[in-house]
Image (spheres, helix red, strand yellow):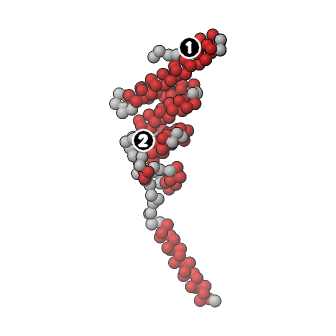
């Protein structure tokens, strides 16, 4: 019986050493590379939400995290999951306020708001998008790669709001409600 216990202790010790060696081997989970240039990704470069959370939990200060967040923003945006994309924009702003992808993330956040307005026709989202676009144009200076795109989004937002207000004015005109028609015609902006 004593011999069996000694053999069991040796086996358990060997197993414990192997587990600790394997566990401390420095093998890291595979982290796909992300694309910097545009919003299209090859299937191998797309990061999943679960991969991101697992990687972030084990490598809190990794320089790959900001690029992973940008990749997730683009992934969710391309899928039309605007609230998730906006969540990752907010996470980037919170954790990397002066990160080198900040200009791109600010532009993507604005683009998300524009597409949310296009889908939901919510005046609060339009006001938020307009305010962020104006702030972007004043904060990011003339050297921003996205300045002309932001100005174009702002103009498209104005045109979409005007078209919507024109449609509503026509609707109320047809219903014989001149006050409602005048209200929506008054919301149409020239510039």
Instruction: Tell me the element at label 1.
Output: helix
Classify 10 Å Cα crowding around label 2: few (below 14), some (14-19), many (20 and above).
Answer: some
Tell which of 63 and 115 is nearer to you: 115
Horizontal side of 182 relative to 51 (left or right) equals right
Residue found 44% across the figure and 63% down from its top: 26
The residue lying at 48 percent from left, 32 percent from top is 110
Task: Identify the residue position indicated by label 2 in the image.
Answer: 39
Does dot 2 land on a helix, a strand or a loop?
A: loop
Res 63 label: none
Q: Is residue 176 left or right of residue 117?
A: right
Asked if 107 appears above or below 35 in the picture, the reply is above
Between the C-alphas of marks 2 and 1, the distance is 37 Å
x and y, in percent, of residue 69 in the image? 47, 45
Q: Which quadrant holds residue 167?
A: top right
Q: Quadrant of the C terminus?
A: top left
Mark linked to residue 185? 1
């Amino acid at each position: 019986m004593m011999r069996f216990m000694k053999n069991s202790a040796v086996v358990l010790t060997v197993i414990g050493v192997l587990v600790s060696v394997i566990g401390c081997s420095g093998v890291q989970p595979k982290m796909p590379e992300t694309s910097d240039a545009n919003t299209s990704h090859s299937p191998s470069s797309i990061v999943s939400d679960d991969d991101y959370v697992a990687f972030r939990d084990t490598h809190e200060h990794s320089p790959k995290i900001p690029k992973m967040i940008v990749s997730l923003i683009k992934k969710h945006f391309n899928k039309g999951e605007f609230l998730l994309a906006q969540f990752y924009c907010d996470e980037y702003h919170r954790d990397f306020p002066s990160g080198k992808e900040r200009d791109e993330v600010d532009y993507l956040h604005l683009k998300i708001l524009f597409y949310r307005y296009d889908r939901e026709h919510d005046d609060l989202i339009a006001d938020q998008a307009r305010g962020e676009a104006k702030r972007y144009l004043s904060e990011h200076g003339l050297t921003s790669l996205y300045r002309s795109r932001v100005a174009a989004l702002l103009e498209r937002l104005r045109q979409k709001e005007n078209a919507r207000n024109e449609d509503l004015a026509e609707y109320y005109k047809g219903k014989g409600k001149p006050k409602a028609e005048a209200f929506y015609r008054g919301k149409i902006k020239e510039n």
